[in-house]
């Protein structure tokens, strides 16, 4: 695990124009003073000693409380975080939905077994490590077999990939490279469900110091070892640019108590669920142990917002970034699904607006086997392969369920990307339409595209006249 704070320096054009360059804390200090008088920026800058910016910060904050959160919002900080678990990256995004950033994608990158975070860092109890290592090995073996399986299907039946026939027919080097990339992504999209949540990923985040401090508070208050370690490393890097804020980046009793209460609630719900059983060899292999995923949609509108107003809000809507009227902006929308694979939750979780709710209580295991074309000849000859793939998913659910009942927080590291959880999003109408268009558009993953198609269908049942104005996509490959 490694965290690197990256400073931002002025561009040559900015230097050439003589624009001021300030340290992150000095920028916040200048903004704080800027709000307390009307002397203007140049007057404030003239009082700064460029040879000693820290002294200039201190002189300003004798008058202004630096602990005020609006001041922290003016301190920009960017960090790159290497080698954390896929689960921890998800957890960070759930705490920092408005941060800018990126994460290594399981849709475009082949993940290797040597990328798994060590059980010591994850806090896996010593007596479980041998069994956990065996589970991780089996998961990656399943991932490799699934990847080979889907690559073979795509190669023999390229029409199932939705790659345009015109592109498949082209013989130019650039076209063939594009086709090769699309074929690989088709296989990655369907094999990734067998990847363990404990596999490592990298992420970059850019947000205000306020965001970093609040993130540290949650990480340091976590009952798990990995988040605590990351919180300490972020705190160390934060000291390079915003040393005066470290007093706020600490474990918080209220967060500790809140996380404990939420986990107790999950354990109680887990105790009411039947324990997963090993797969019956005679069971149907298409879609086994996958929990039904039912979409739901609730809309709260004021009495002055009718369907005609919603249509009017979309009348100039020619792309998902274009103008949307205030009637849609004033709609409260709650939508979600009863059982979404964690692979898709990672994407749905990153939408910036509103609140998301995802209790990490496993509902089932989705493995994309329902995507196998019925007329593909490979299916009847791979019964044993598919049976083995199903077994690792069910073993994951079984182990996690038992650990939860024993109040073991590390249950999360026994899960795979195919593990299904409930997921819901509370936002406004315009942001709902944006998400529906984005997640069904070009390059969309087949599974979350289906989830958004399902919830858009519920929207069109409620507002049928809006259907021709919503730019619902067909998730063609890019």
Image: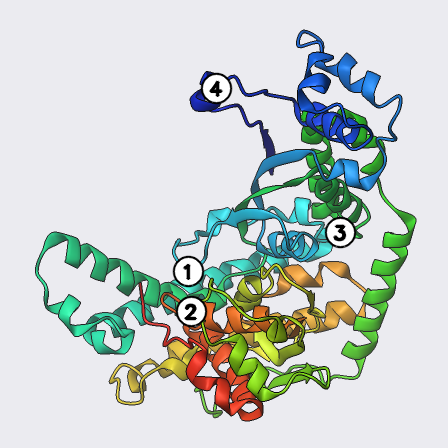
Q: Where is residue 70 in the image (x, y as percent from the top left)?
A: 78, 41
Please name which of the two marks, 4 or 1, marks the residue nearer to the observer: 4
Q: Residue 445 has which mark?
A: 2
Vertical arrangement, residue 51 with respect to residue 176, above or below: above
Mark 1 lies on a secondary structure that is: loop
In terms of image quadrants, where is residue 307? bottom right
Q: Where is residue 439 in the image (x, y as percent from the top left)?
A: 47, 69
Disc 4 + disc 1, Cβ < 8 Å: no
Please name which of the two marks, 4 or 3, marks the residue nearer to the observer: 4
Question: Which residue bears the numbered disc 4?
Answer: 17
Mark 2 lies on a secondary structure that is: loop
* Quadrant where the C terminus is found in the figure: bottom left
Label 4 Cα neighbours within 10 Å, binned few <14 / some 14-19 / many ≥20: few
Q: Where is residue 452 in the image (x, y as percent from the top left)?
A: 51, 77
Disc 3 + disc 2, Cβ < 8 Å: no
Mark 3 lies on a secondary structure that is: loop
Is 465 in front, or is 231? 465
Label 3 Cα neighbours within 10 Å, binned few <14 / some 14-19 / many ≥20: some
Question: Which residue bears the numbered disc 1?
Answer: 107
Vertical arrangement, residue 319 with respect to residue 9, above or below: below
Please name which of the two marks, 3 or 2, marks the residue nearer to the observer: 2
């Amino acid at each position: 695990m490694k965290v690197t704070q990256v400073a931002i320096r002025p561009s040559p054009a900015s230097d050439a124009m003589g624009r001021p360059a300030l340290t992150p804390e000095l920028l916040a200090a200048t903004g704080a003073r800027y709000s307390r008088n009307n002397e203007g920026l140049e007057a404030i800058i003239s009082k700064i000693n460029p040879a000693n910016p820290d002294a200039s910060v201190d002189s300003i904050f004798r008058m202004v409380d630096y602990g005020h959160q609006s001041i922290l919002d003016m301190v920009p900080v960017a960090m790159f975080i290497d080698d954390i678990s896929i689960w921890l990256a998800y957890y960070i995004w759930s705490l920092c939905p408005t941060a800018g950033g990126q994460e290594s994608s399981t849709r475009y990158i082949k993940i290797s077994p040597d990328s798994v975070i060590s059980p010591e860092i994850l806090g896996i109890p010593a007596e479980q490590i041998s069994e956990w290592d065996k589970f991780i090995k089996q998961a990656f073996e399943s991932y490799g077999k699934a990847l080979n399986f889907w690559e073979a299907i795509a190669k023999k039946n390229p029409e199932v990939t939705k790659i345009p026939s015109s592109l498949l027919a082209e013989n130019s080097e650039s076209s063939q490279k594009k086709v090769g990339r699309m074929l690989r992504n088709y296989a990655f999209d369907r094999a990734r469900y067998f990847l363990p949540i404990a596999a490592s990923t990298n992420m970059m985040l850019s947000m205000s110091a306020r965001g970093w401090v609040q993130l540290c508070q949650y990480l340091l208050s976590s009952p798990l070892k990995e988040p605590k370690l990351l919180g300490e490393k972020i705190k160390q890097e934060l000291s390079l640019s915003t040393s005066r804020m470290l007093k706020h980046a600490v474990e918080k009793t209220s967060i500790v108590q809140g996380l404990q209460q939420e986990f107790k609630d999950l354990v109680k719900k887990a105790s009411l669920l039947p324990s997963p059983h090993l797969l019956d060899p005679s069971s149907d292999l298409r879609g086994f142990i996958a929990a039904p995923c039912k979409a739901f949609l609730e809309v709260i509108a004021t009495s002055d917002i009718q369907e005609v107003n919603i249509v009017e809000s979309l009348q100039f809507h020619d792309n998902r970034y274009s103008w949307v009227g205030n009637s849609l902006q004033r709609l409260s929308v709650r939508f979600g699904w009863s059982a979404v694979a964690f692979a898709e939750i990672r994407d749905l979780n990153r939408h910036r607006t509103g609140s998301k709710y995802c209790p990490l209580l496993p509902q089932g295991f989705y493995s994309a086997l329902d995507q196998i074309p019925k007329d593909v000849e490979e299916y009847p000859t791979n019964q044993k392969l598919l049976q083995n793939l199903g077994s690792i998913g069910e073993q994951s659910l079984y182990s996690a369920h038992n650990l939860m009942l024993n109040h073991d927080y590390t249950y999360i590291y026994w899960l795979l990307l195919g593990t299904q959880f409930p997921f819901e999003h509370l936002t406004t109408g315009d942001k709902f339409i944006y998400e529906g268009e984005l997640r069904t558009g070009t390059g969309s993953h087949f599974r979350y595209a289906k989830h958004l198609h399902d919830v858009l269908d519920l929207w069109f049942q409620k507002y049928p006249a809006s259907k021709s104005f919503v730019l619902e996509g067909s998730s063609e490959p890019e």
